[in-house]
Structure formats: C-alpha cells, structure tokens
Amino acid sequence: MTIYNLTIDQLVDKALADDFLRLATRRATDRLRNNKYKATEELGDWEKWRQAGETIRTHVVANLDYYLQQLIVQVEKQGGHVHLAKTPVDAVAYVRNIVWEHEARNVIKSKSMISEEIHLNHALENEGSTVIETDLGEYIIQIAGEPPSHIIVPAMHKTRQQVTELFNPIAGHELTSDTPTLTRFVRLQMRERFLQGDMGITGCNFAVADTGSIVMVTNEGNGRMVSTLPRVQITLMGMERIVPSFRELDVMLNLLARSATGQRLSSYTTILTPPKHTSDSDGPEEFHLVILDHNRSEILGDKTFRTALNCIRCGACFNVCPVYRQIGGHAYGSVYAGPIGSVITPLLEKDWEKWGHLPFFSSLCGACSEACPVRIPLHDLLVKLRARKTLSGHTPKIEQQIFKAYRYFFTHERTLRRVLRLGSRLQMPFVRNGRISGGPPPLSNWTKSRTLPKVAPKSFMQMWSELKHK
Amino acid sequence: MKVSLFATCLANALYPEMGLTMARILKYLGHTVDVPEGQACCGQIAFNSGYFDDAREVARMLIDSFEHSEIVVGPSGSCIAMIHHYYPTLFEKEPAYLKKANNLIQKSYEFTQFVVDVLKKPDLGAKYSAQATYHPSCHATRLLEIGDAPITLLKQVKNLELLPLPEAHLCCGFGGTFSVKMPKISGAMVAEKAQHVLDSGADLLLGMDMGCLMNISGYLEKLNKPVKTMHIIQLLGEGMKS
C-alpha cells in the first residue's frame, strides 16, 4: 500500500510507527535549525532583516498586478513566452503542449514545488515522456515513488541506508552507503541524463520584475545544467514569487539562504534571462515562463490571509515545528507540509472535506511565526483558518453543541460552580489513586497516554466566596 | 495596590488551592486582593478550536468582570497571552468592547511577570530543597514575551538547584483542545518532552502554566516516573510556609 491511498489518520499512525523517519526528521531539522541560528546571528540585528523582508514582500503582494505586468513585458521583450495559468490543469496542459510540439522524450527537471503542486510529472509520464528529477533529494523520492516531505529537503525522511537500498537496483550492484559512493553514483546517472535532455523544466525562487530575470537558488548545480543544455526551457513559478529589482533581491537572497539551510548564499545562485541571445555561448533557444495562479488571486483579495503569499518557501517553519518533528511531511497528506503547508493548502485547494484537518496539525506554540524570515504570523493564520472552517459549517454537530454549552456555562459563573460540583461526583468511576484515567471519548483521547487531575470538590470561586463570607 | 485575581478555568476547577496560594503571596507582598465574580475563562479553548463567536461571549464576560479592577493577575502565561494577543482580533468589529479589551490588556499580567517586572520583588524569602528543571511554556515565552521573570523568581528560592532542560524550546504538546483533537501527535510530543525532563536529572519539574504541567505530569505519572511537578506559585507557597 502506498501513502497515496491512506487516510490522514493512517498516515499519522504510519509516521509515528516509523522510527527511521522520526529519527531522520529530528536530526535533519535540528541541524537546519542550528545552522539557521548561526547564519542569522552573524548578521547582527536579524529582526531588522526580517522587517525589511516583510516590507518588501508586503509591498510586492499589494502591487502584484503592476509587477506581474512589468515582468511579463520584460520576459517577452527578451524573446520569452509567458503563460498565465489560472489553474493547475491549465498549467499542465500548456506544458504538455510544448512537450508534444517539440516531441520531447527526455524531460530533465530541477527542483520546482509548483510542478509538485500541479502534479506535472505524472501527467508528462502518461504522455510517454521520461521525466528525470535532477535534484538529489527529488531524484531519491522519484525513485521511491513518494511526494516530497519537506519543501527544501524533499527526502528528509529517508536515512542513508534507505537511500542506498533505493539506488541498488538501478546500479545493478550493492553500493556502500558512504557519501562519496552515493553522490558519485548519482553524478554518473545525471551526467548522461543532462546530455540526453531535450527539454528542461526549472522552478523559480524569485523573478526580478524590472529585468525579467529568473533566479534559482540551488546547491548542486543541476539547475544550471537544466537551464543551459536542453534546447527548450520551461520555468514554473507561483504568481507571487516576484521581487521588484536587484536591490530587493539582495535582501531576499540573504533571508532565503540563511533561513533555509543556514548558508550565507547557496552554492549556486543562478540568474538567467533566457532565451539565448546571439552573444550568449549557451542557453535554451526557446523559453517559456508559466505563472501559476491556482487561487492565489483569491488569497490576495482576502485581507485575513494575504500575508500567506509573503512566504519565500525557505522551510524554516518546518524545522522548528514540534508537530512536523514528530510526523514528518507525508502525514499531512498535502504537497506543502509543515506550518506554511497547513496554511496555504486549504486556501489553494479550497476543499474543507479534504484539507480541513491541516489547520489542526498545530499546537499553536508559535515557533513557526518566530522562525519566519518575513514575519508571517503563521500560528495566527492557522487559528483563523480554524474559524473559517467552523463558519463554513464543516465541523461536527456535536462539537458545535459542546462549544454552545461551554459558552453558556462560562458566561454563567454561578451555574458553573454547580456544574463543577456535579462533575466532581460524576468523575468518581474514573478516579484511580486520586487521578482520572480511562473514561469515554473525548476524555479517553487524553487518558490513553496521560492521567488527569480530579475536578476539585469545591471550585476556587466557591472557596473564595465562602472565605469572604466567614 | 488592589490586585484582582483571574483564577483561570483550569485552576478554578482542578487546582483551587493554587488560587488561594496566589492570593496569600500577593497579600504577603502588601497588596489587597479581590476575586471579581462572573469571571470564568479567557475563552481560549473555544478560540483555538475555531469557535470565535462562542469565545467572544466568554471573553466579554471576563472583560466585564474586571472592568473596575486596578490590576489583574493570573497564574498562566497562556490565558494572559490570549487577552493580550487575541482580544483585539475578537473585538475588532466592536469599538466599545475593543476599548474595554485594551483597558484589560493594559492592566493584566501573568503572575511571575507581575512580581518580577512590575513589583520588582523577586525575593519572597522562600526555601525549597530540590533539583528542579523549568519548562518555559510557549505562549508565555513567544506571545507574552515574559522573558526571564520565572527564572528570576526561582533563583531567589533558597536550596533550589536549577538544572537545564534539554530542548526547552519545544512545545510539550498540550495546545488545549489540540491534545484531545490530535491525541496521537500530542502524545508523541509529550513523550519527547517527558524524556527531556528525565534527561535533565531533575526530581522536580517547574513551570508557570498549569495546562502544560498537567500534560507533562499526566504523562510522567502514566509512566510511573517519580518526577514531581509544581507550578511556581505552588513551589513558592510551600517554600514560604517555613
């Protein structure tokens, strides 16, 4: 059974039972969090950088129509084609047409979360193309047939040994699990694929509006190969992924690299203005920029959630999230996991039945908001999404009744005293050694792993008023 | 000063003695203490579950109860953070109550914050022999930003040795209704927190939010671990008896 046909509850069970996954996730997030801490400390006043990031992102999102227009004009002036895709289906269809037009058999890709969001690989493979992920992490999960578990480190949930076992059948012999052996194996695999690729698909970390440049932040150099070797290049970007000019890009690159991996700059920061110009020695002859909306316009118009579009996909919120730490990314069931995934997935997909659990995958501890380099109040957005779900009527009737009762008793404190007194008697069957254990649901949800103190025979309010009247 | 106590729903129902201790400490510090009737809960339990309308009415009752209070002090960073951080959102469409909410925000404090930062009297002459570790609750730290106030108080307690808690920044997994709605994830979180408490080598776990402590101690007890758990107010109460 693959993870694609499990329920959310089953996914959570599976994750919690997987000691390898939990160890791998804990180790990797700890390392990334500590690296981020060092890389941000050395900047001096990190808060000022965060504020600058927030200001830039808020400005861009508020003026997105202007900057999108500027970007499109620039890219087209340079000879590129731009397609604004309203939906994932629309984006996939556009890419598929180009693949079909060029009869591209070997499509090579660098990392793109938009391609995950629109489920592109599957669609292209159905048409008979071979799609190769060239980012190491993406390559690993492609072989495993799994979605990414982290937006920056897609194979975070895999241990070294598991990766070796995935590579062995392709290598045709037993590989040792040391880093040089594994990376050498992948490099040899990739070299051949890069040369065979007749189309390249890349992601886009930022697009610079006033120059029409595409910026890719990578660590393996594969992004450069994908954007120089094939004759045709398609770049996928989310509608909001824009910076006005190189001035703002400087700030954003610092925030992104330091928050994502704790690097001052990633090993490769690639800035391109395709297609190939007459003076260029390499680059694609044909370039398409696909800009995906997928309900981003709607989020833009919703002032409660607009800040969610400020996200620069650094993954810092994943690395501090105590929920993600326990269950990894797959248990969320969505392409985007972690705190930001729990915020944007219900907004992008607009399906409470399917994604209504996500805002509840948080103890609201606030670590995500604290870590966010552009100061998105993620835990506030999560709680507001819960309210949105309640208002939409997608919560159980019994739960609605419980909160009606709560509202009544906690606005009638005198009655509450009597209720508590009654509760202290009704709890007797579940009291063992002075503590509550067992009991019916939802109490049992607590008592399965914990005991609970007894309701006191006299509430504090009762005690106080008795003392006062003595 | 006349200090009004906000008992909080948890202390009111489960830990009433702690409310009395809090009153005793404030009286010891020379203040008059009252407990306005009508108060019951900050509304967070409904708010965090997405029931803003129900939360608003409970919050309104709390605001009304303390309308004439000079200072409001509660034994929980989370409940006070709810008032400070979310009441403006709850009443954004009601200018009259927004004003009242802001008034409550101005005059309300978490207990350790009040004693250390406002009264500036961290030394209560308490004495308590234990090797303790301290869990910094998330809402107190991240939303209310009470900083080192609890530690400052604890450092004044004679014979109390404070041991560092590994990975102290991690949430214990309580999260109010989260612990019941997502019991397995919450259970995994509290299991890790409890392990860190055991790894600290302490025989006493201290904190300033009863929700978190109830969660961690409930788990430790299920495991039959001999680590005792106390709210800082309970510790001070015991320590000041002698």
Image (cartoon, rainbow, N blue to C red):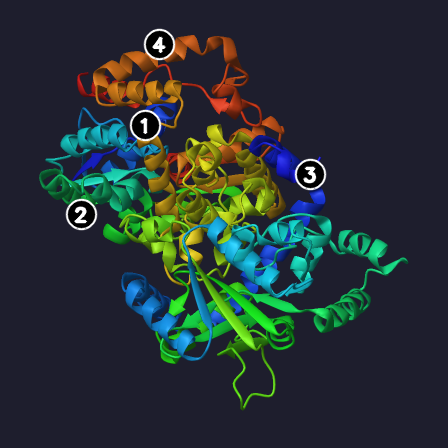
Secondary structure of the residue carrying tag 2 is helix
Q: Is residue B67 left or right of residue B125?
A: left
Q: Is residue A6 left or right of residue A440?
A: right
Q: Amino acid at mark 1?
A: Cys
Q: Are marks 2 and 1 in contact (CB under 8 Å)?
A: no
Q: Read off the residue under disc 3.
A: A2
Q: Read off the residue under disc 4.
A: A422
Q: Read off the residue under disc 1.
A: B9
Q: Is residue A84 left or right of residue B44?
A: right
Query: Is residue B29 in sight in this rendering?
Result: no
Q: Amino acid at mark 3?
A: Thr
Residue extending furthest toward the bottom: A279
Residue extending furthest toward the right: A173
Which numbered disc, 3 or 4, marks the residue that appears first in the sequence?
3
Q: Position of residue A408 (x, y in %)?
A: 25, 19
Point out which mark residue B106 bears: 2
Chain letter of mark 1 equals B
